Structures are given as C-alpha cells and as structure tokens.
Image: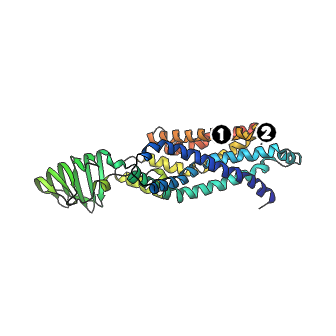
C-alpha cells in the first residue's frame, strides 16, 4: 500500500468511526425513546431489556454506515482543503481524481464490510432482539387476533380459521386439513375450536370429520358435537410469525419467497427487501462520490456545517429508501427499480456535481 493511500485512508478512518458511533447512538436513542413507555411498563427483567438493547446496536450501526461514510468524506476533504494540502498537490500537477481515489476505495471496503455484517451478524442479533421483544418485553400474542388465518402446525397439515384469538385460545370456523403425499387425506370442519390446557389438545365443536381416498374422493363423513383432536400445538406456538427483512440473509429471504409462493401469498415485499439488501452497501460508494464535490464547495466551512450536511443528506437518503420500499411493496414500482432508485438518484446528482466541480 502506498504512503499516500495510507495517509488519505487514515484521514477517512477517524471521522468514519466518530460518525458511525454518533449517528448510530442518535438513531438508537430515538428508537429507544419511542419504545420507552412499553419498556417501562414491561414485566421483563432488567437483564432481558439490557440484552435487547445490546442486540439492537448492530442493526443501527449497519443502518447508519452510509451517513458515517458521507461524514468521513466531508471531514477528510475539508481537512485537506483547509490545510492547503489539496492546493499543494494540484500545483504539483497531481490530478484531483487520483487524490480522492483512496477515499472511494475506503468507501468500497466499508461497503464490503457492511454487506458481510448484513449477511451474518445483523440477522442473528436482530432476530434474537425481536424474539425478546415479542415474547418477553412486549408480548404481542397477548392481544393478537388473526382474521382469515392460515396456520401451519406441522408438515402436511394446515389449519384455516376466520378468526384466531391467541390469548383466549379460540378459533371461529376452523378447518383442519391433513395431507398425504400432497393430497388431502382427512379434513375436520367445525364451527368453533378452543385450546384445552389440561389435555394439551385443541377441542372442536359442532363440525364434520371427513376422510378422502387416493383420488380425492370422499370416503366417509361423520358429524360430531365435540371432538378432541390430535392437534397438540399451543396457541402461542401456532400463531403465525413473519420474519422481517432484517432478520434474514439473502438466502433466507429467497427461502421465504418460496414459502410465500407455496401458500399463494404475494412475495413482492420480500423481493423488494431482497434487492434492497444488494443495493444498500453500494450506497457507501455513492454517498462518498456525492460528498467529494460538496466538500470542495464547503471548503473552509466549520466542521459543524459538514456534520449537518451529512445528517441532512443521510436522512434524505433514508427517506428515499423508505419511499422505495413502500412503492415496491405496493406494486407501484417493480422491486428492482424500487430498491435501486435511491442509489440511481443520488448517483446522478453526484455525477452532475462532479462535472460542475471538474474533479
């Protein structure tokens, strides 16, 4: 590694670590204050809450990496300009592009590190933190009500219900389907169902039990007033849980897409999240390229101005990212376009500013 590259990289590293810590802390505290009421009234032990907070930090660190990259670029370039180093190398015939190239390489290295964290550390930590939140700190199952629910208690078994109340352990109009080699073998169709903690089974009332042959024809049909079924999955375990994009790697996201398709559900939100996972690390390079001409325009401005610029542009990018997510999820834009549009917009602005600054 050349001395010049190490020198520029060092000028980038310090502000990057500072920005990563400050921005991640600000975002983390904002989220924490939003949840403070629920945490304060929670029955969870302090150790559980503390573990949840620690596990949330990797999420906010990865989320805020582009803003830290932009801040590091602004600080580094402003430092070179204010000390006269940039003017000196220009006078010596050193091209501006070569001068700033190590910053782009540094942002690319950060992008690679963020992608690796996104695929390894982040899903594991975020999934564990969400489990703690849902089950111990803010157990949503206590009041969850699922309308037109399709539940999967086990392989080749489905339960559908017009209403499933988790805390009460009740179902309205439940239908239990058992399959064998992909065909419907048995069906239980009832008016209502309730969980019996004593026997550890679901008990169904006022229904019909049906058996089907290998061709799908009805073999027998028997009505019942009350039937203690062999369904032993408790309400909390039966409640459908949907992983968020942050809890999954790219491979897990594709697996979830396949599961959605098998259940006949739209996978558009997952496809949007999948492409966002690929596009997000490139944001570091785009914002670094955007920061170069902005820093040259600011020149000898105080560092507080650079900090404010990084904060403003960073949150503007996050707003574009959120808009792309909703547009892709709703189908107004194809998932690929929705995921990559923030990068394309900011890259176009960066290119225009580069031409104007003649870097």
In the image, 11 versus 110, the foreground residue is 11
- The quarter of the image holding the N terminus is bottom right
Q: Nearer the viewer, mark 1 or mark 2?
A: 2
Tag 2 secondary structure: loop
Mark 1 neighbour density, 10 Å: few (under 14) some (14–19) many (20 or more): some
Residue 299, percent from left and from top: 78, 39
Image disc number at residue 301:
none
Q: Name the spot of residue 199 as percent of width and height, x first.
A: 20, 60
For the point 60% across and 44% down, which residue is it? 343
Disc 2: CA contacts within 10 A as few (<14), some (14-19) or many (>=20): some
The residue lying toward the viewer, choosing from 76 and 162, is 76
Who's the residue at 48% across and 56% down the image? 51
Percent x, y of residue 248: 47, 55
Look at the numbered disc 1 and give the secondary structure of its residue: helix
Residue 140 seen in this snapshot: yes
Picture disc at residue 300: 2
Task: Report which residue position mark 1 lands on.
Answer: 348
Q: Is residue 318 above or below residue 128?
A: above
Q: Is residue 195 left or right of residue 237?
A: left
């Amino acid at each position: 590694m050349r001395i010049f590259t190490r020198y520029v990289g060092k000028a980038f590293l310090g502000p990057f670590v500072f920005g990563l810590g400050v921005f991640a802390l600000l975002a983390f505290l904002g989220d924490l204050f939003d949840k403070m009421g629920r945490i304060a009234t929670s029955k969870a032990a302090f150790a559980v809450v503390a573990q949840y907070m620690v596990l949330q930090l990797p999420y906010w660190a990865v989320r805020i990496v582009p803003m830290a990259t932009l801040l590091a670029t602004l600080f580094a370039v402003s430092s070179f300009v204010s000390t006269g180093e940039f003017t000196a190398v220009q006078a010596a015939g050193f091209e501006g592009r070569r001068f700033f190239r190590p910053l782009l390489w540094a942002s690319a290295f950060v992008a690679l590190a963020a992608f690796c964290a996104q695929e390894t550390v982040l899903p594991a930590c975020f999934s564990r933190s969400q489990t703690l939140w849902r089950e111990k700190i803010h157990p949503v199952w206590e009041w969850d009500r699922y309308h037109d629910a399709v539940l999967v208690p086990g392989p080749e078994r489905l339960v559908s219900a017009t209403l499933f109340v988790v805390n009460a352990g009740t179902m309205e109009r439940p239908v239990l389907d058992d399959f064998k080699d992909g065909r419907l073998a048995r069906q239980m169709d009832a008016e209502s169902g309730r969980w019996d903690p004593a026997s550890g089974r679901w008990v169904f009332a006022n229904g019909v039990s049906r058996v089907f042959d290998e061709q799908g024809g009805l073999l027998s049909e028997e009505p019942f007033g009350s039937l203690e079924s062999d369904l032993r999955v408790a309400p909390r375990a039966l409640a459908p849980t949907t992983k968020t994009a942050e809890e999954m790697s790219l491979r897990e996201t594709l697996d979830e897409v396949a599961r959605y398709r098998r259940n006949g559900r739209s996978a558009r939100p997952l496809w949007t999240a999948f492409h966002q996972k690929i596009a997000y690390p490139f944001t570091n390079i785009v914002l670094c390229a955007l920061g170069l001409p902005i820093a040259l325009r600011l020149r000898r401005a105080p560092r507080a101005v650079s900090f404010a610029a990084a904060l403003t542009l960073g949150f503007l990018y996050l707003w574009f990212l959120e808009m792309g997510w909703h547009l892709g999820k709703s189908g107004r834009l194809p998932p690929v376009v929705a995921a990559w549009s923030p990068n394309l917009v900011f890259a176009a602005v960066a290119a225009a500013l580069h031409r104007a600054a003649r870097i």
